[in-house]
């Protein structure tokens, strides 16, 4: 089934999302519908040698070769009791397609990002954890998986590559303050390391849009020029409490903050998301893991005449 047949378009900046609930070994998980291209019954796959244990193989629907990830194996959970009823969730992010093998799809729920809590890093493994949030919906607790981290672990070459910064050549140092809003501990660390390698030494990191907005409100109260506190905002889109679209909309509606350069750096960037981001006033939108291009955009936006 093509997910576009069931998806209800969300207005930009409302801080809402739609979650597709699915099960693996009876446990409830979730994925942002914005990542889902379609769902289909399990298909035969071609096994591949010398791959990660969670890679089930590849299959080729409609002429496209797609890698199949067995989430039960990745999560170290028991296999399905009735494999023939299993489901492939075809997801698209970081401009790539993957099939995630799950045991059932429960349905789709629309919720607010305020209903999603950041997992306790002690319980959920900190940088090694694979849960980006815990959502509560009608009494059910849903673990939102970090699919980007799963793919980066299985296929490291698809993630952020610090070596890409070296290709930019010699660079000068800059103390212009850069605010990074990113909920993934691992990605936040890698983005910070990449920016520091690129010469940006004054980086402030927050865990979500709500924390970024609180930081910007405090910066306004300081009374001096806002660029002394934030010269450019780098924001993910998917974040607990407040997403990047809502944060961007609030900034553009604020008389003091409205000219602040904003770059949305997200695995969700596609044609539809670009339209939404442009509607709410993002200066630039770039897909992870294009870290060198991100640095180039920061260079341009922080040296422009305001």
Image: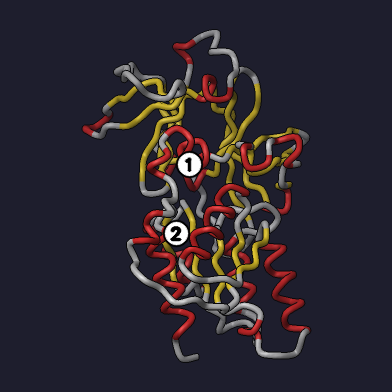
Residue that carries the numbered disc 1 in the rendered image = 6
Task: State the residue in front, 16 or 121.
Answer: 121
Q: Secondary structure at mark 1?
A: loop
Task: Give left or right: position of 248 versus 119.
Answer: left
Q: Earlier in the sequence, mark 2 or mark 1?
A: 1
Q: Is residue 120 above or below residue 53?
A: below
In which quarter of the view is residue 22 placed?
top right
Checking the image for residue 182, the label placed there is none
Residue 160 x/y as whole percent: 44, 50
Q: Is residue 161 above or below residue 298?
A: above
Judging from the image, the colouring scheme is secondary structure
Pointer 1 local density, CA inside 10 Å: few below 14, some 14–19, many at least 20: few
- Outermost residue to the left: 63
In whole angstroms, how far apart are the C-alphas of marks 2 and 1?
18 Å
Residue at the spot 38% in from the left edge and 42% down from the top edge: 157
In which quarter of the view is residue 31 placed?
top right
Residue at the spot 75% in from the left edge and 89% down from the top edge: 223
Residue that carries the numbered disc 2 in the rendered image = 273
In which quarter of the view is residue 45 placed?
top left
Between label 2 and label 1, give the one nearer the viewer: 2
Residue 87 x/y as whole percent: 46, 23
Do the CB atoms of the residues marked 2 and 1 lie less than 8 Å apart?
no
Task: State the residue in front, 72 or 27.
Answer: 72
Q: Secondary structure at mark 2?
A: helix
Q: Is residue 218 above or below residue 198?
A: below
Q: Is residue 109 above or below residue 206?
A: above
Residue 280 x/y as whole percent: 52, 71
Position of the N terminus, as image quadrant, is top left
Task: Give left or right: position of 306 versus 128.
Answer: left
Pointer 2 local density, CA inside 10 Å: few below 14, some 14–19, many at least 20: some
- Outermost residue to the top: 81
């Amino acid at each position: 089934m093509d997910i576009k047949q069931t998806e209800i378009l969300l207005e930009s900046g409302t801080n809402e999302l739609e979650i597709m609930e699915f099960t693996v070994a009876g446990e409830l998980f979730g994925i942002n519908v914005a990542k889902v291209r379609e769902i289909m019954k399990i298909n035969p796959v071609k096994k591949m040698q010398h791959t990660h244990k969670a890679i089930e193989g590849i299959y080729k629907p409609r002429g496209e070769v797609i890698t199949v990830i067995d989430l039960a194996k990745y999560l170290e959970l028991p296999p399905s009791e009735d494999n023939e009823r299993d489901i492939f969730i075809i997801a698209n992010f970081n401009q790539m397609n993957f099939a995630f093998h799950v045991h059932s799809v429960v349905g789709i729920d629309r919720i607010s990002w305020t209903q999603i809590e950041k997992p306790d890093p002690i319980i959920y493994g900190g940088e090694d954890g694979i849960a980006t949030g815990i959502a509560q919906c009608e009494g059910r607790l849903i673990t939102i998986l970090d699919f980007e981290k799963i793919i980066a672990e299985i296929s490291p070459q698809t993630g952020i590559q610090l070596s890409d910064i070296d290709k930019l050549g010699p660079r000068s140092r800059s103390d212009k303050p850069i605010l990074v809003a990113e909920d993934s501990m691992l990605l936040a660390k890698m983005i910070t390391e990449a920016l520091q390698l690129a010469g940006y030494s004054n980086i402030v990191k927050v865990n979500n849009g709500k924390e970024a907005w609180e930081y910007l409100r405090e910066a306004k109260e300081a009374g001096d020029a806002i660029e002394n506190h934030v010269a450019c905002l780098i924001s993910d889109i998917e974040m607990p409490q407040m997403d990047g679209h809502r944060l961007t909309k609030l900034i553009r509606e604020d008389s003091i903050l409205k000219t602040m350069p904003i770059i949305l750096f997200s695995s969700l960037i596609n044609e539809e998301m670009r339209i939404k981001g442009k509607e709410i006033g993002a200066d630039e939108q770039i897909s992870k893991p294009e870290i060198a291009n991100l640095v180039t955009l920061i260079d341009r936006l922080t040296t422009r005449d305001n």
